[in-house]
Image (tube, grey):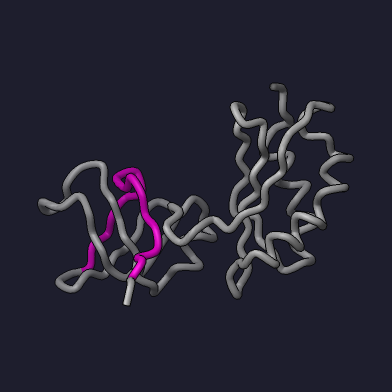
Amino acid sequence: MNVKPISEIRAFLEGIASPMGIEIVDVEWNDKAASLTVYIETEGGVDLDTCEKFHNAIMEPIDVLDPTYDQPYTLNVSSPGLDRPFKTARDFERNLQKEVEVKLFAPLKGKKFLEGVLAAYDGTSITLKTEKEELKIALNKVAKINKAIKFE
């Protein structure tokens, strides 16, 4: 199916989200399911009511944008989830001084999985404070970084 560029759809939706205090985290198109999924975040987190409120706010405007050129599709609005990987500078900045999990492409000091506090981010690398040391790691060495999920 022919779909408008995700960057265009995202920019359009950000104009609606911003005044609502909602941040667009990601926009994904699934060709097999003919579905457009918008992942959102707010300062206080995202619950079902927030997703429904934003879905209702974008239903008509996105039909005017016509992302699929008059082809039917399903519109979904969702929380990005607790374990989603960091993708944007904002993701890294929002999680500074918080516990994270880092998976590496190749071992660093014998380990491919690290846990610690995200101490710094400069756009090309992170500084991870572990129990034993502080490590500066280039982002091109990181396979995935996400919030550490602790179950009490």
Q: Position of residue 79 (x, y in %)?
A: 58, 58
Q: Is residue 43 left or right of residue 82?
A: right
User: Where does residue 140 sit, x and y in percent of width and height?
Assistant: 34, 43
In the picture, measured across the screen, residue 34 lies left or right of residue 96, that is right
- Give the side of residue 71 with respect to residue 87, left or right: right
Return the residue nearer the eye: 116 or 47: 47
6 versus 121 height, above or below: above
* Numbered circles on residues, count: 0
In this rendering, would 30 be left or right of 70?
left
**What residue occupies the far top of the structure in this picture?**
1
**Image quarter of the C terminus:** bottom left
Q: Residue at x 67, y 40 (%)?
A: 36
Quarter holding the N terminus is: top right
**Magenta-drawn stretch, dominant element (helix, strand or loop):** strand
The location of residue 78, given as percent across then percent down, is 61, 54
Residue at x-position 66% and y-position 61% = 23
Q: Residue at x 69, y 66 (%)?
A: 50
Q: Residue 62 placed where, x, y %?
A: 82, 44
Q: Is residue 35 above or below residue 15?
A: above
Q: Residue at x 65, y 49 (%)?
A: 38
Asked whether residue 42 is drawn in magenta, I would say no
* Magenta residues, start to end: 134-150
